[in-house]
Image (spheres, rainbow, N blue to C red):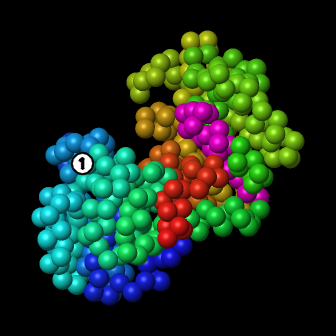
Amino acid sequence: MKTIKDIDISGKKVFIRVDFNVPLDLHQNITDDSRIRAVLGTLEYALDHNAKLIIASHIGRPNGKIVPELSLSPVAKRLGRFLRKDVVMAKDCIGLEIKTFVDQMKPGNVVLLENLRYHPGEQKNEDSFAKALAELCDVYINDAFAVSHRINASVVAITKFAPVSAAGFLLQKELCYFENALADPKRPLVAIVGGAKVSSKIGALENMLHHVDKFIIGGAMANTFLKSVGYDLGKSKVEMDLIKVATSVMKKAIKRGIKFYLPVDAVVASKFDAEAEIKIVPIQEIPEKWMALDIGPATSLLYSQALYDAKTIIWNGPMGVFEMDAFSRGTFAMARSVADSYALSIVGGGDTDVAIHKSGETDRITYISTGGGAFLALMEGKNLPAVAALDDT
């Protein structure tokens, strides 16, 4: 797979697909610009080499329709401040007017195309839409790791029509960190897997059985594992149809000599509500009509001890409903334990990156991935369609 450094981009129209799917508040203010900052290295490299910079992204889910609230206009303003340049906000991402404007660009000019998902052809991976995008450029660069698991026109079909295609620095870095962590990890290698559903993590769990020395399980998905070994969990969320799957994963782990950690206590609530009555109980003592919404302090201590000798850590998914303050302690304690370790730590997916930022431990984590679904796809051992498309070129 070529990277942007392998290509002469001087004076050329360089189309860079990024992921600027940033959160906005009710007043269209960006509440977290980390995804913008993550690709600045690629954008600045292109500008340093006198490229004409055409940037494309999506934001939100407009489902093929123009939704003014999901315009990339706020991103253009923030990006302009970061680059210290004027960033022109285009009215669309394809069409004669856009093509004419791009053809008149000078080296060093920057344009941000409007939301790609305003067009249904983007998510349908339509050749006609991809070709219209490709006609804007001399060079195509994919630096959108977070959408590289999707078969979308701007990351897959476009590579068939762009004169030259390559990866940006962020995509390259994301792949290298993860692949190195699995290909030749320093051991012990610990996988921390949390989140709400076992069903969304089955592939990751099965694949990671071939790589890890320890599994640490948290979040609501831990309930299904606990139920499979006979615990009564009150009204806690349990995927009853996956009890056998959970049992199978644990048996395979034991057979391979993998240490498998489950919660020993929990923060339970009378209902799923930030204002609900709460208490901390051992797993064996969850009241009949209560539900587990976070790991407890004894579990946090156990997990911290399990991480003490770790040399490589891969973490996907929170330990509880961290969006509610009462159930955030377990996730934040895990963030501190990972940060305090001497391991190479890679974190991503399932809002884990958001939790890390909230915990204040960002600077002490080796690498925080920008991808959710893409990060999980790598944990599952899958090839990313957008990466495969670049390889094919």
Q: What residue is at 41 percent from the left and 27 percent from the top?
A: 274
Looking at the image, the residue that sits furthest to the top is 288
Q: Viewer-proximal residue, 129 or 324?
A: 129
Q: How many numbered circles are shown? A: 1
Q: Viewer-proximal residue, 6 or 158?
A: 158
* 350 w.r.t. 110: above or below: above
Q: Quadrant of residue 104?
A: bottom left
Crowding near pointer 1: few (<14 within 10 Å), some, many (20+)? many
Residue beneath label 1, please? 118
| Left or right of 266 in this view: 358 | left
Q: What residue is at 50 percent from the left and 48 percent from the top?
A: 373
Segment tinted magenta in the rendering:
188-205
Quarter in which the N terminus is drawn? bottom right
* Rendered location of residue 307, percent (x, y): 71, 53
* 321 w.r.t. 113: above or below: above
* Rendered location of residue 187, percent (x, y): 77, 62
Please tell me whether mark 1 sits on a helix, a strand or a loop: helix
The amino acid beneath tag 1 is Tyr
Q: Viewer-proximal residue, 3 or 259?
A: 3
Q: What residue is at 29 percent from the left and 45 percent from the top?
A: 120
